[in-house]
Image (cartoon, rainbow, N blue to C red):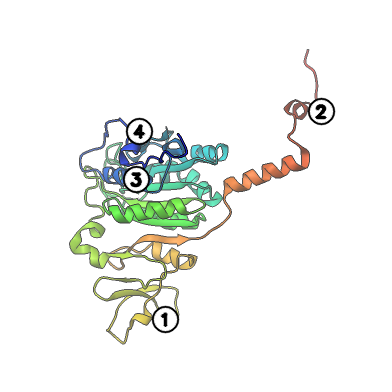
Amino acid sequence: MSPSEPIKKLTRKDFTSDQDVRWCPGCGDYAILATMQRTLPELGADPAKTVFVSGIGCSSRFPYYMNTYGFHSIHGRAPAFATGLKLTNPELDVWVVTGDGDGLSIGGNHLMHLLRRNVDLQLLLFNNRIYGLTKGQYSPTSLVGLRSPSTPYGSIDLPVVPASLALGAGARFVARSVDTLASHLSETFVAARGHRGTSFVEILQNCPVFADGTWEHVKTKAKVSDSVLMLEHGKPMLFGENKGLRLVPGKLELEVVTIGENGVGEADILVHDEGNRPMAFLLSGLEPPSFPMCLGVIYREVGPTYDASVRAQIDGAIAKRGVGDIDALLAEGHTWTVE
């Protein structure tokens, strides 16, 4: 390319592979895929330096449909593969795609360590509250009482709250969005990619076959007003008709109040602070009917990344001891010869 030749502006087509998309009609994964394919060119992403890593499940077919590098790994182990990729080639833009089953059940241990280490990558957890690929078994996020092939009399397990689990594991970026909220989801992708460290994004996603309507209370227009709180840093936590969140006087508990009732004014409404970790824990677990579900960036904190720390440690060792000699390393200490 000559110096005067303009750089080609990429489009969604440049990030779309030639593979036929094989999800069930109406699956929320289609919307997530389309949003990702539109967002990456807007960010100036380079397909040759972008890689999607997945485990096993419906969501894990994602790498096939992106015209980037991809790795369809084994059940629950995508975080481990992605960590190795980022350590080996720090220039890669690494995205992990997982689901509530793959990421929180067999992959829960790997997810936890990825979050606490703060590897510089983005993790998208599609949460449809069901195992879709294996025909509708209950998952770690399924609600109590769910009847499924594996819980014919109803699930008795308390569900995992992904955002709360991520915060408990030490995540420094936790956000939540919805598959069909294209603009909001795109903004969330942009924020996640701009964060240095592990960005954890929970995406509320519909499975029309085995768990249809599981997120109806946060997706139906008639219900969204009172059931969704769009978080914005520095903005009051307002939703619905003059409703908002405030702390219960003298307690670390939230309550819903209405401006204009019982002497409540806008000054009483909490202002969202992305750096307030205790508040993030409270916000992450809210859900209708008692509270609105919070969407947007719940928590964000800058901290040292695992991959940068590893590289710094290696550079320091080389500066102190030299590049090293593998033969000398193997021969040092007690050795013996087998004849």
Along the polypeptide, which appears first: circle 4 or circle 2?
Answer: 4
Read off the residue under disc 3.
Answer: 36
Asked whether the viewer can see residue 100, the reply is no
**Location of residue 274 (image quadrant):** bottom left
- Mark 1: which secondary structure? loop
Position above or below: 244 against 116 = below
The answer to whether marks 1 and 3 mark residues whose Cβ atoms lie closer than 8 Å is no
Cα distance in 3D space between marks 1 and 3:
43 Å
Read off the residue under disc 2.
Answer: 334
- Residue at left offset 27%, top offset 34%: 21
> Crowding at label 3, few (<14), some or many (≥20) Cα neighbours within 10 Å?
some
The answer to whether marks 3 and 4 mark residues whose Cβ atoms lie closer than 8 Å is no
Quarter placement of the N terminus: top left
Cα distance in 3D space between marks 2 and 3:
55 Å
Quarter placement of the C terminus: top right
Read off the residue under disc 1.
Answer: 249
- Mark 2: which secondary structure? loop
The answer to whether marks 1 and 2 mark residues whose Cβ atoms lie closer than 8 Å is no
Cα distance in 3D space between marks 1 and 2:
68 Å
Cα distance in 3D space between marks 3 and 4:
13 Å
Instruction: Give the amino acid type for the residue marked by disc 2 in the picture.
Output: His
Read off the residue under disc 4.
Answer: 64
Asked whether the viewer can see residue 284, the reply is yes
Cα distance in 3D space between marks 1 and 4:
52 Å
Along the polypeptide, which appears first: circle 1 or circle 4?
Answer: 4
> Crowding at label 2, few (<14), some or many (≥20) Cα neighbours within 10 Å?
few
Judge from the rendering whether residue 289 lies leftward or rightward of residue 172; answer left or right: left
